[in-house]
Amino acid sequence: MEESLFNADEAYFQGNGQKSNGRQPLPGRMRPRSLDEYVGQSHLLAPGKLLRRAIDADMFSSIILSGPPGCGKTSLAELIATLTDSHFIRLSGVTSRVEDIREAIKAAVKLKNSCGRQTILFIDEIHRFNKAQQDSLLPDVENGNIRLIGATTHNVQFYIVGALLSRSLVFTLKPLSEADIIKLLKLCINDSRSFGGRKILMTDEAINFLAERSEGDARKALNALELAVMTTIPENDVTTITLEIIEESIQQKFINYDADNHYDTASAFIKSMRGSDADAAIYYLAKMLAGGEDIRFIARRITIFASEDIGNADPRALQIAVNAMQAIEMIGMPEARIILAQAVTYCATAPKSNASYMAIGKALDDVENNRILEIPVHLKDKHSNGTLTDKHQQNYKYPHEYGGFVAQEYMSVAKKYYEPKDIGYELKIKERIAYWDSLRAMENQANEDKK
């Protein structure tokens, strides 16, 4: 078993292993002090990226940071304040009132007038502010009394008022990758602010497991690490953190859900729905959720399935899948599992047809590999070509004047792409198409008889 040994040198634990009083939890102590110490979000903070440029140039008035818990929103806000030499005031969308906002702005104006120093007003969980509270920020953001940074785990389009969004740079932070979490854990154990005075031996198994099970949440990873260290008795002045200790500290047993399991489980999930086995589909849904799968990925797969494998056999399936995809964005876990379960069980038990999927495949093959068909003259826009006349346009028969259907040419060469199946609502569609085909045949026969 490979092991990694890390040391720290500042006293943090007493000789009996008890935590010293008055210290912040580990995530708070490990706030980054520079961009070099900040882990993750390279898509925003790499040199040349918009947010990095805005920070380096100290050119921004309002920023909204959205992203899942533990991805570094608060740390980034504090770091921006440090790098721009701004005073930092923190409010909570849960507990703060309009009066608190006014007091913060009053203090910011006083500081600006006295020494010209800017104030960053950071509002955590800004989505909890109602419209009036958000609107109260607008004048002072507009005139530069404060520089606002708002953080939210929710979709900004649903929860942040449009006027504030239009005045803000909006950035979406991603969950940390496993590599990011591993880097953070190693930095943490090496840092003098963390476990000074203790030698920490953490097996590679434990590091990799914690990185995987943290689901991109740095706070979850650091809290688990702190709990593991605090509750482990040193032996020969070394605190050894094993896989078993980390499993208990994160309060979640290991579920093998690596890259191969991700694809295999998703495949089994789709094939179970396609095979109309609701129980199997629910099991694989549960496995994906327990394995930390992105709920958006699951919702997208259900939505694609609703169109590809159910189609017009039950048109409501797509509606339910899309509604589920939108709902989980607003609800989040753990309740999102209920919404996903409803969509999965509906799709698994719905009648199945891939006729629409097959139809577009055939049509694309024709377009890409065969000669492009000429559009019949009476279907063209008379304004798009000077050679067309009103007479050409008059040859078009308006179906509504004929009871909703009239036989006329819509393609210069007859083609058959969509072939509905004898199942669910698609059976009705098939019967309707057959009826129209019979009317077309009668019209064609009448035209032949005239000749």
Image (cartoon, rainbow, N blue to C red):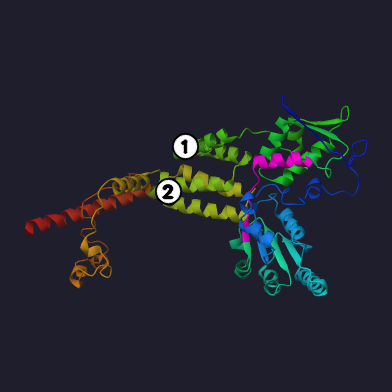
The residue singled out by tag 2 in the image is: 307
Instruction: Return the x and y of residue 416 as percentages of the image width and height.
Output: 26, 48
- Crowding at label 2, few (<14), some or many (≥20) Cα neighbours within 10 Å? many
Residue 204 falls in which quadrant of the image? top right
Does the segment drawn in magenta span residue 179? yes
In x, y percent, where is residue 88? 78, 62
Disc 1 marks a residue whose amino acid type is: Lys
Q: Is residue 398 left or right of residue 172?
A: left
Residue furthest left in the image: 451
- The x, y position of residue 382, in whole percent, is 25, 69
Query: Considering only vertical position in the picture, is 97 above or below 183?
Result: below
Q: Residue at x 46, y 43 (%)?
A: 349
Question: Upstream in the sequence, badge 1 or badge 2?
Answer: 1
Is 74 a magenta residue? no
- 133 vs 380, nearest the viewer: 380
Residue holding disc 1: 271
For residue 355, the mark is none
Question: From the image, which quarter does the N terminus lie in?
Answer: top right
Residue 214 can be seen in this image: no
